[in-house]
Image (spheres, grey):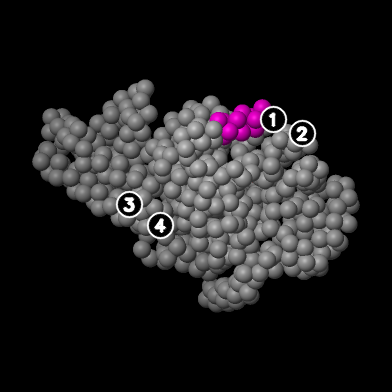
Amino acid sequence: MSNIQGIAASSGIAIAKVYPLEAPDLSYNKSKIDNPTDEVTRLHEALDVSKGELEKIKAHTKKTLGDEHAEIFSAHLLVLSDPELIQPIEDKIKSENVNAEAALDETANMFIDMFKNMDNEYMRERAADIQDVTKRVMAHLLGVTFPDPALINEEVVIVADDLTPSDTAQLNKQYVKGFTTDIGGRTSHSAIMARSLEIPAVVGTKEITKTAKKNDMIIVDGIDGDVIINPTEEQIASYKEKMENFEKQKQEWAKLKDEPTKTAEGEHVELVANIGTPDDVEGVLNNGGEGVGLYRTEFLYMGKSQLPTEEEQFEAYKSVLEQMGDKPVVVRTLDIGGDKELDYLDLPHEMNPFLGYRAIRLCLERDDIFRTQLRALLRASVYGNLKIMFPMIATLEEFREAKNMLEEEKVKLAEAGTDVSDEIEVGMMVEIPATAVLARQFAKEVDFFSIGTNDLIQYTMAADRMNERVSYLYQPYNPAILNLINNVIEAAHAEGKWAGMCGEMAGDEIAIPILLGLGLDEFSMSATSILPARTQIKDLSKKELASFKEEILSMGTADEVVAFVKEKTK
Ligand SMILES: C=C(OP(=O)(O)O)C(=O)O
Ligand SMILES: [Mg+2]
C-alpha cells in the first residue's frame, strides 16, 4: 500500500483497477525476412485490427462528442485503406526482403516528410494523419498495447503523466471511474474537463506513473487530493463510506437547483457555468446554472483534422443558445495556444507557448479564421441571449481591432439580409495583468469584463499553471491578485458595467466570500460547483463581507487572507 498526495482536481471518489495510459515503446529492429508473403499477411492483419479499433473509436466519439469530432477518425480510416500508401509498403517488403515494421516506418516517413513540407494546409494535415495511424499499426505489428481511452470496457482509473484535452474528451464515464496524473494543476485543461464530465480526478502527483502498475487497485480521492495504491480492506471500506456521504451531500445541494442564488440579505448573485461543448449544457441545467459565463469554443477546433466550417460552428452556437433559452450565454472566441494545440495549423514550436502566439494574437493575424467564427456567432445571435468576449487581450488596440472586425462582419451580414441581434454585449477576458492595471481605460470601451484568474494568476505570479513544482506560487488568495481583481470590479462599476469571473477561482469555497465582498457580479464555474456555491452563498452576508474589503486588500500574504476568511465565515 502507498499513499500519494496530489491536487484535488474534480470531486468524488473512485475505486478501481489501474489503467496506465502511456505512450508505448515502438522501437523495432530492421531485419531481413525469408518469406515476403507471410510478412505482407502480417501487415494486413495489423491494418485490419487497427481499422476495427478506429471504427469503434469513431462510433464512440460520434456518440459522445458529435459528428465533427468523429471526422478525424474517418480521415484515419481512409489513410489505412489508401493503396497509395499501402502498396509501396508491400512493394518494399517484397523487393527489399525487409520486415513489415521497417517497410511501414520507412514508407510512412517518406510520405510524412514529403507532405509536411508542402505549401498546402490540406497536405500538411495528411502528414499528421499518417503519423497517427502508423503508430497504431506499428504497435500491432510489435504486439504491444496501444492505449485507447475510448476502447476501455471495464471499470478502471486512468494513470498517466498527463492527459491531453482530446484524451479527456474520449473518456467513457461508464468505465473510467477516475484519473490521476503526474503533472498538471487545478486549472489545467484536463482538470477542467474532468469536472465537466464529473469524473473524480487528482492531478500533479509528480510520481503516480512510477508507483502505480497495471491492474493495481487504486483509490482516487478527488475531494482531498489523496491517491492510495493497493489499499487495505479497511481503507476501501472507509472510502466507500466517504463516497456514499458525498452522494448524500450532492442530494442536499440538489434541493437548491431551481432556486435563484441569494445572499443572506436576499441580494441576487449570478451563478453561471463554464462549458466546452453543446453537450455540456445538459449538465449546466441539471446543476441549476443561471447561464453560461464561458463557452470555450476551442474544443470545436480540437480533435479534428481541419478547421470547423462556419456552418458547423453556427450549429454549435445555435444549439447552446437555444438550449439555454433566454439565459445569458457568454461565448469566448478562439483561445488556442498555450496547452491547447491545433496540429493542423502547423504552428512553429515556441520556447514559451503561454507567452507566445495564441488566442487573440493569432486571430487578429489569421483573420480568415476569426471572421468565420464571428459570422457564425452573429448568425446564431438571434437564437438566444448571446454575449461575445475576446480572450488574452493585452492592449486597447487589440480590443478595438477585434471589435471592429465584429462590427464589419455585422454590417456585411446585414447587407446580405441576414438577421443579427442588435443586443449583443461585447466584452473581454481580463487575464493579462496589464489589462487589470489599466481596467479604468478598458471599462470605457467594453460592455463587461470576465476575469480569467487561471491565467491572471500565472502571469502575475510568473508561475506556470501546469507546473506542479511551482504550484506553491500559484496563489489565488495572494493580495496581489485580490488587488487586481478589485481594480477590475471597481473600474467596471465606475462605468456602469458588470464584472464577472470565469477562472476556476470563482467556484472556490475560500474565494467566494472574498469576491462577494469585492462586489463581483457574476461567478462562472464548473457546473458541478454551482450548487455547493449556491448553498454557501445563502449563508453569507454581502454587506458584512464588503466591510472587510480594505482590511483584506492591505494584507501581506495569502496565508493571512485565508486565516482571516476562515475566521470570519466560521
Ligand atoms: C478562464 C480562463 O481561460 P482558460 O482557462 O481557458 O485559459 C482563465 O484563464 O481563467
Ligand atoms: Mg485563459
In the image, residue 372 sits, relative to residue 556, either above or below, namely above
* Region of the chain picked out in magenta, as a range: 396-408
Res 393 → quadrant: top right
In the image, residue 347 sits, relative to residue 40, either above or below, namely above
Type of amino acid under label 1: Leu
The N terminus sits in image quarter: bottom right
- Judging by the rendered image, the residue that carries numbered circle 3 is 58
- Judging by the rendered image, the residue that carries numbered circle 4 is 64
Q: Secondary structure at mark 3?
A: helix
Work out how far the residue at label 4 is from the one at label 3, CA to CA, in angstroms: 10 Å
Write the residue at 41% across / 39% down: 309
Q: Magenta stretch: residue 421 in it?
A: no
Work out how far the residue at label 1 is from the one at label 2, CA to CA, in angstroms: 8 Å
Tag 1–tag 3 contact (CB < 8 Å): no
The image position of residue 379, as x and y in percent, is 49, 43
- Judging by the rendered image, the residue that carries numbered circle 1 is 396
Q: Nearer the viewer, residue 204 or 143?
A: 204
Work out how far the residue at label 1 is from the one at label 4, CA to CA, in angstroms: 40 Å
